[in-house]
Amino acid sequence: RQALPDLEEQAANALAFLNDANAYGEDGRAIDPSVRVSSEPTSEMVWARVKGYPWWPSRVHRPRDPKFSQAMSERNEILVVFVGEAAQYHLPLEDTAPFTGDEQDSHMPKKDRHIQRSLRLAIHTTRMIQAHEEKTGQIVPSGSLDVAYS
């Protein structure tokens, strides 16, 4: 078995990635925006998108490493976990918007039967999480955001 890197090493690797000019395309967006850093979920739910994919409900995370957090802040980026996924993504703030869950929201993806079914489940899950958190005052752990989309 291979040992997992410790949290400091993970944070250092993620920070090096953020500072690597080769990791960003001509448009300034990360070529691969997925990262793995020690973080904690916030109560903020947002719409977020990765270039080439539709807007999707997501939970904002707060990096535990202050250097990583500062580097993201300097780049005007945010750390999110999409509902139905476990991976973290650092995205430009402009690729996020407040989540309302309203059917008339301009961030709702265009009609596509497969996406619409998955999106309805993601929105339902997000609304349930918000209601639970409002009722209990406790943040639902990110692993609970994983939803089966088969």
Image (cartoon, grey):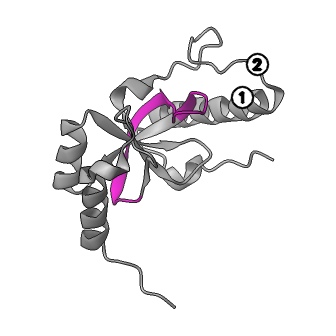
Residue 115 spot, x, y in % from top left: 74, 31
Q: Is residue 127 left or right of residue 14?
A: right
Which residue is pictured at 57% across the width and 47% down the height?
145
Which residue is pictured at 46% across the width and 49% down the height?
32
Residue 63 makes an appearance in the image: no
Q: How many marks?
A: 2
Q: Residues within 10 Å of mark 1 (few under 14, many from 20)?
A: few
Residue 71 makes an appearance in the image: yes
Q: Which one is nearer the viewer's eye here, 102 or 115? A: 115
Q: Which residue is mark 2?
A: 111
**Splitting the image into 4 quarters, where does residue 25 fall?**
top left
Seen in the picture, residue 90 relative to 65 is either above or below; the reply is: above
Residue type at numbered disc 2: Lys
Which residue is pictured at 48% across the width and 46% down the height?
140
Q: Is residue 118 left or right of residue 79?
A: right
Residue 125 spot, x, y in % from top left: 63, 36
Which residue is pictured at 20% across the width and 46% down the height?
71
For label 2, the SS is loop
Question: Which is nearer the N-term, disc 2 or disc 1?
Answer: 2
Residue type at numbered disc 1: Arg
Seen in the picture, residue 103 relative to 2 is either above or below; the reply is: above
Seen in the picture, residue 1 relative to 26 is either above or below; the reply is: below
Q: Which residues are magenta?
A: 36-57
Residue 62 spot, x, y in % from top left: 31, 46
Do tag 2 and tag 1 residues touch (Cβ < 8 Å)? no
**Splitting the image into 4 quarters, where does residue 91 fall?**
top left
For label 1, the SS is helix
